[in-house]
Amino acid sequence: MPQLSSQHLKGHRELRLAHLALSFITMGFVWQEGEEETVKLLPRNLAVPYWEISQMLGLPPILVHADFVLANWKKKNLNGNLDTIFSLPGGESLRGFILVTCLVEKAAAPGLKVQYNSYNLQRHRQSRQEVTDYVDPAIFYAVIRIFLSGWKDNPAMPGGLIYEGVSDEPMSYSGGSAAQSTVLHAFDELLTIHHSKESTAFLHRMRDYMPPHHRAFIEEIQSAPSLKQHILSSGNEKLRIAYNQCVSVLADLRTYHIAIVTKFIVIAAANAKAKKGKPSHWAGNFQINPPSSLQERGTGGSGILSFLKSVRDTTRAGIIQG
Ligand code: HEM
């Protein structure tokens, strides 16, 4: 592959498309042999343009949620049906995972506009239910997940990755995760939800994987006068009830997400372990060979269930008592 030049790219859209393309090529290159034969060096013909484009966009040189989901869709036909632009192994399940997550983002958009209310969060929850319809947990666990993994806090790549022609020192970056989605960060800030120190540290680190203007949007909500404080000092019962509804639905959404993660990771891990080495060790066309380094951790690198439960519980603790 010749070394690509980033000089001819014009405007934000072309840069985002280039980041998306190089991210998919990089994840495919790094994880093509599974977790056993991981590479230690990204060749310069890939690393140099990837680094330059990432610098221009203020994004890290790894696949992020803003690539994988937010930029990776196109209209399939005039009816507006969607398709992904780039793919990795995982077939229809991968397509379902990307597009359903994309629809969850879309469902959240009205909630991020001024008419913030619990109805929008309900819609957010409904669209998430489709993950179970379109994504096979066995394929998600054994085939898709590894390609979203990063080279930070990952025992399969403890030394990170050298970006040849950029630096001689290896660099470490977390993998793609919906924890990098702006949506729940924005809801948390709007409702003044305080998570534990450890969870906050992880979630704030995930903000470094967002496009800079997404991060700025969250910070702007954070620095604005507190909605919760206003409700508390107003003594207005209707406002308190409306606020509490929002907090409850956000906590319910997180409970639902925990159920999804249990199905797609915890139960899928147990099933994969039980089948290991057996001839039935196939899901559709894909052989089940799940990465062991990801058994306990999310692709973003978190210790999964304790983190998700803590975040759900601190959300619920935001309720204003009457
Ligand atoms: C098969 C479906 C899904 C699985 C297996 C899954 C798994 C996970 C895992 C393991 C984490 C922990 C962070 C990490 O280390 O990556 C996480 C966090 C998170 N996920 Fe998902 N996820 C799924 C679908 C979604 C969807 C559709 C969304 C919606 C945009 C979403 C939003 C989030 C958010 C916002 C967090 C951060 C924790 C929080 O704020 O509650 N996830 N997910």
Image: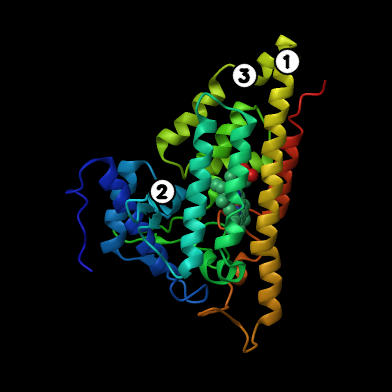
Q: Residue at x 77, y 33 (%)?
A: 317
How many residues crowd mark 3 within 10 Å: few (<14), some (14–19), many (20+)? some
Quarter of the image where one finds residue 84: bottom left
On the rendered structure, is 4 left or right of 218?
A: left
Residue 277 has which mark?
none
Q: Secondary structure at mark 1?
A: helix
Residue 176 placement (x, y as % from top left): 49, 54
Q: Secondary structure at mark 2?
A: loop
Q: Nearer the viewer, mark 1 or mark 2?
A: 1
Could you tell me if residue 157 is visible in this image?
A: no
How far is the residue under mark 3 from the one under mark 1?
10 Å
- Residue 232's tag is 1
Mark 1 closeness class: few <14, some 14–19, many ≥20 residues within 10 Å: some
Residue on which disc 3 sits? 226
Residue at screen point 66% across, 14% down: 230
Q: Residue 198 at what x, y percent from top left?
A: 67, 43
Q: Amino acid at mark 1?
A: Leu
Q: Nearer the viewer, residue 55 or 125?
A: 125
Q: Secondary structure at mark 3?
A: loop
Q: Can you say which quadrant of the picture contains the C terminus?
A: top right
- 10 Å neighbourhood of mark 2: few (<14), some, or many (≥20)? some
**Residue 75 at x, y percent in the picture:** 35, 52
Image quadrant occupied by the N terminus:
bottom left
Q: Is residue 13 above or below residue 260?
A: above
List the residue tagged with mark 2: 60
- Residue at 26% x, 63% y is 45
Query: Left or right: 49 with respect to 243?
Result: left
How far apart, in angstroms, are the residues tagged by discs 2 and 3? 31 Å
Q: At 42% from the left edge and 55% from the top edge, which residue is drawn? A: 62
